[in-house]
Image (spheres, helix red, strand yellow):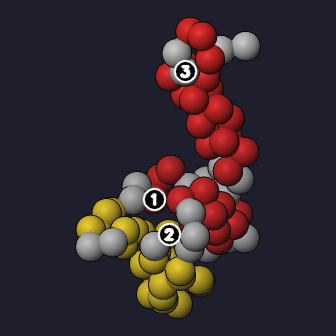
Amino acid sequence: MVIFITALFSPTDIRSFSAQILSLEEGFDFLNDLVGTGFVLVDVRLLDQSRIIPLPIEGFDGSPSSTAIRQLEEEWTNLLKSPDEKP
């Protein structure tokens, strides 16, 4: 996957670049790290196989998200298990 990013690095310095990511969680943490260090996201798009998906920039506030995403994944996995698989 590739993330295409346009961000303000200062009031007069807008840059566009891309980053190769291994997972969505990694990409989201990368974007949150950028915001957390003071950069302002202008546009973010995810290239996944042949689809380009615009991401909502307001969803990135500078806080790490991978822990919360993993917790949600565990909850969904437990909810989707059949009754005989649950502990």
Task: Using a 10 Å C-alpha cutoff, classify the residue at mark 1 as few (fewer than 14 neighbours), some (14 to 19) or many (20 or more).
Answer: some
Instruction: Name the image quarter holding residue 79.
Output: top right
Disc with the residue nearer the chain's start (1 vs 2) = 2
The image position of residue 50, as x and y in percent, is: 26, 73
- Can I make out residue 8 in this image? no
Q: Are marks 1 and 2 in contact (CB under 8 Å)?
A: yes
The image position of residue 14, as x and y in percent, is: 48, 87
Task: Using a 10 Å C-alpha cutoff, classify the residue at mark 2 as few (fewer than 14 neighbours), some (14 to 19) or many (20 or more).
Answer: many
Task: Using a 10 Å C-alpha cutoff, classify the residue at mark 3 as few (fewer than 14 neighbours), some (14 to 19) or many (20 or more).
Answer: few
The image position of residue 83, as x and y in percent, is: 56, 9
Residue at coordinates 57% horizontally, 29% vertically from top-left?
Answer: 77
Q: Are marks 2 and 3 in contact (CB under 8 Å)?
A: no
Callout 1 secondary element: helix
In this rendering, position of residue 53 left or right of residue 33: left
CA gap, disc 1 to disc 2? 6 Å
Residue at coordinates 55% horizontally, 28% vertically from top-left?
Answer: 76
Which residue reaches farthest top?
83
In the drawing, what numbered circle is on residue 57? 1
User: Which amino acid, mark 1?
Assistant: Ile
The image position of residue 69, as x and y in percent, is: 62, 43
Quadrant of the drawing holding the C terminus: top right
- Residue, disc 2: 41
In this rendering, position of residue 87 left or right of residue 80: right
In the drawing, what numbered circle is on residue 12? none
Residue at coordinates 72% horizontally, 70% vertically from top-left?
Answer: 37
Callout 2 secondary element: strand
Disc with the residue nearer the chain's start (2 vs 3) = 2
- Residue, disc 3: 81
User: In front: 62, or 71?
Assistant: 71
User: Which amino acid, mark 2?
Assistant: Leu
CA gap, disc 3 to disc 1? 33 Å
**Numbered disc total:** 3
